[in-house]
Image (tube, rainbow, N blue to C red):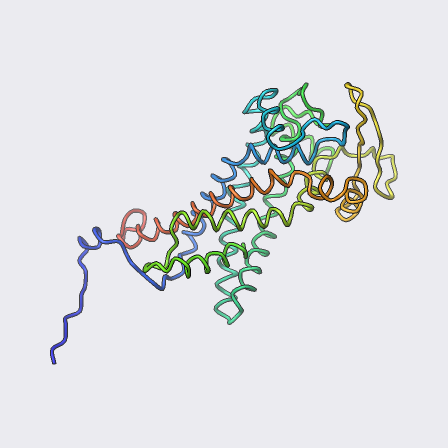
């Protein structure tokens, strides 16, 4: 019985036919680094204006009536009164300085932790959760300082802003950084990917761009909704005006003042996350307190996650093909 000769494609044929691998290997860490940095920073930049609207809704003083009624009213008001660069895109510079290295570190840490735990026999769900958690912890050392700068400049708007009172008035990012230093001292997505690949059942084992977008949007929106109460407290703690040093704070403090329009505004000083969550729930309720700004937050996290994960996955595929075809910078010497 004759045997068919083994097929070894030439380099010319490789350039014509793309690789089709059902059991794809994990991409190299350098690919994850590049794809993660690109996906995260591009997505954050595109969705920054929605994040600004969310910050304004969460951080506006408790007045009767409030300045911003909902997401669309806030968006149109900020655009009309303050413009794009210093209004909707206020704080974009520190956001980008934190986004690129932060998402790069997150994805590399996530992949390394996930692969290490999976190789040692750890269940996939636990490996994905652990990878995301450790990645977030390490990336937070980059995210948090830039997030403080970004959030305060988003809440402030432009310098000497006559349209919104935030308690801050920074000239630019560098001025904000100096003043703050001087005076203040992925599991959902992985599970959706598995189910989506099983549902599509493509021969190459990959997802279509439409399904990648849907997975990222649903995972990001769900995570954004569940974490809204903590995100509200993060915004309020990062943007509240520091208490005078001669005052002794023993609990949550609230003072009532009147604005120029005559509306009563409650100025609240929060002394911690749990104290603030209890106070918001008691005095402002579930929707107005704990889930303030949930609409733009879910909208932002959904689209931001969809953009980020699509770019991440496509960048990995591109680098895989470049390595397979021996293209620069993966060309063999």
Residue at (68% x, 18% y) in the render: 162
- The part of the image, by quadrant, that contains residue 179 is top right
As drawn, the residue found furthest toward the left would be 2
Specify the quadrant that holds the N terminus.
bottom left
User: In the drawing, does residue 268 fall left or right of residue 176?
Assistant: right
Front-most of 255 and 26? Answer: 255
Visible residue check, residue 333: no
What residue sits 61% from the left and 26% below the top? 172
Residue lying furthest bottom: 1
Instruction: Please state the total of marks drawn on the protein image.
Output: 0
For the residue pair 303 and 324, the one nearer the viewer reads as 303
Is any part of residue 266 visible from this angle? yes
Residue 167, given in percent of the width and then of the height, sits at 73, 27
Residue 219 in the image: x percent, y percent?
53, 51
The answer to which image quadrant residue 92 occupies is top right
x then y, percent, for residue 115: 48, 63
Horizontal side, residue 169 vs residue 129: left or right: right
Q: Nearer the viewer, residue 7 or 222?
A: 222
Q: Is residue 294 above or below residue 11?
A: above
Q: Is residue 14 left or right of residue 117?
A: left
- Front residue of this view, candidates 185 and 13: 13
Q: Position of residue 333 (x, y in %)?
A: 26, 52
Residue 277 horizontal side relative to residue 311, left or right: right
């Amino acid at each position: 019985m004759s045997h068919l000769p083994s097929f070894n494609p030439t380099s010319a044929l490789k350039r014509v036919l793309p690789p089709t691998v059902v059991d794809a290997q994990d991409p190299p860490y350098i690919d994850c680094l590049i794809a993660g940095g690109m996906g995260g920073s591009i997505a954050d930049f595109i969705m920054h204006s929605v994040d600004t609207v969310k910050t304004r809704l969460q951080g506006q003083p408790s007045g009767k009536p409030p300045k911003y009624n909902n997401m669309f009213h806030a968006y149109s008001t900020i655009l009309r009164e303050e413009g794009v660069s210093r209004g909707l895109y206020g704080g974009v510079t520190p956001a980008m300085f934190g986004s690129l290295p932060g998402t790069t570190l997150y994805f590399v840490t996530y992949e390394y932790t996930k692969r290490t735990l999976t190789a040692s026999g750890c269940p996939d769900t636990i490996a994905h959760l652990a990878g995301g958690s450790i990645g977030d912890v390490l990336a937070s050392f980059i995210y948090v300082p830039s997030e403080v700068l970004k959030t305060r400049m988003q809440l402030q708007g432009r310098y000497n802003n006559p349209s919104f009172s935030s308690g801050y008035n920074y000239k630019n990012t560098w001025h904000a950084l100096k003043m703050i230093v001087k005076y203040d001292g992925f599991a959902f997505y992985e599970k959706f990917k598995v189910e989506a690949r099983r549902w599509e059942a493509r021969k190459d084992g990959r997802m279509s761009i439409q399904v990648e977008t849907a997975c990222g949007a649903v995972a990001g929106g769900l995570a954004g909704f569940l974490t809204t109460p903590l995100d509200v407290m993060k915004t309020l703690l990062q943007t509240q005006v520091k208490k005078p040093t001669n005052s002794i704070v023993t609990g949550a403090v609230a003072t009532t003042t009147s604005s120029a329009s005559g509306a009563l505004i409650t100025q609240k000083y929060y002394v911690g996350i749990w104290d603030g969550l209890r106070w918001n729930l008691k005095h402002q309720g579930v929707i107005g307190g704990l889930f303030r700004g949930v609409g733009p937050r879910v909208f932002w996290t959904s689209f931001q996650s969809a953009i980020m994960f699509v770019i991440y996955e496509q960048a990995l595929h591109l680098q895989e093909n470049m390595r397979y075809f021996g293209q620069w910078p993966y060309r063999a010497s």
